[in-house]
Amino acid sequence: MASLAPHDRRSGDDVLESTGSPNTSDIEKTASNEKPTLEKVENIASVTSQDEHAPEAQLSAKAKLAFVALAFLWTGSQIPIYLFGAIPPYIYADIGGSDRWTWITLANILALAAVCPFVGSLSDLFGRRYIALCGTSFVILGMIIASTAQTMNIVIGGQVFAGIGAGINELTALAAASEMAPVSKRGKYVGVLVFTITPFCLSALYAQLIAAYASWRYVGLLCALWNLVGLVMTAIFYFPPPRTNPSGLSRRAILQQIDFVGGFLSTSGLILF
């Protein structure tokens, strides 16, 4: 057997080194590349944990009063149909119109449904504050018309105005409450807002007692005064941030995007069919 040449009798370490196996410098480079990644993950986890346990900003006194104003807007949008819906016999016994008394509630609901699709776009155009003030004014105007009416048709007309205002304020109050609440507590804030209608769970009883012992017209007065409080509080305390316009559209362009024809057709369908 031929003996190995001197250059063939190399140690195992020399063979490994010559075959291109990873050396110490390569291992150190790999470790140095992995270390920042691990630290980055740990930092992200630490920041996330701090965000979860960080105390959230509390509402200021003025913001709380603005929330109360929104509660008046919300309840004020609901109570006209609750209260007037309980006393049609008192109304048509006084001014007639027993053949169309169902339109007292229908007019309110249809007007509300007709205006709701446009509230968001109008809020983007004019701002929630002015839309809320406009909606409350519509409810007050409707209650004045309805409670001073001498014929059933005028009562129905008043409910149309009240329904327009109700549609505006119902959506505006819910959206505004969600906007002013901390992100993690939006459900809680909106739930509290909706829960403020609880005192009017007995609205049918209230309305019938007022109509029986005073006059059904005082029901309209109650609704108007309630909304007047909401109007004043909104004017004094509710100043939301300006609406963002990321697309950079002009007012004319925003108005052109509103589907007025579709709204008219849907409302016409509700009324006619």
Image (cartoon, helix red, strand yellow):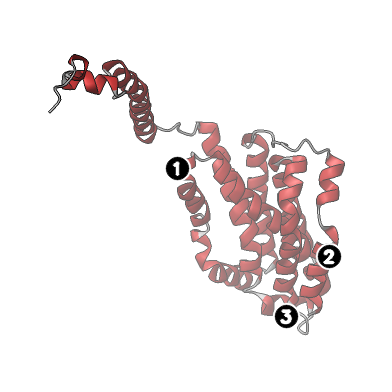
Packing grade of label 3 (10 A; few <14, some 14-19, many >=20) is: few
Mark 2 and mark 1 lie on one chain; the one further toward the N terminus is 1
Q: Could you tell me residue 69's position as x and y percent?
A: 59, 44
The one of 213 and 267 positioned closer to us in this rendering = 267
Q: Is residue 54 left or right of residue 221?
A: left
Label disc, if present, on residue 93 of the rendered structure: 3
Residue at mark 3 to residue at mark 2: CA–CA distance: 34 Å
If the image is split into quadrants, where does the N terminus sit? top left
Residue 143 visible, this orientation: no
Residue 259 falls in image quadrant: bottom right
Q: Please report the residue visible at 62 percent of the width from the left and 67 percent of the height from the top.
A: 83
Please say if the residues under marks 1 and 3 sit with CB atoms less than 8 Å apart: no
Name the kind of residue labelled 1 in the image. Answer: Ser
Q: Could you tell me residue 94's position as x and y percent?
A: 75, 77
Residue 33 falls in image quadrant: top left
Mark 1 and mark 3 lie on one chain; the one further toward the N terminus is 3
The one of 29 and 129 positioned closer to us in this rendering = 29
Name the kind of residue labelled 3 in the image. Answer: Ala
Residue 257 visible, this orientation: yes
- The count of marks equals 3
Q: Secondary structure at mark 3?
A: helix
Label disc, if present, on residue 184 of the rendered structure: 1
Q: Secondary structure at mark 2?
A: helix
Please say if the residues under marks 3 and 2 sit with CB atoms less than 8 Å apart: no
In the image as oriented, which residue stretches furthest toward the bottom? 99
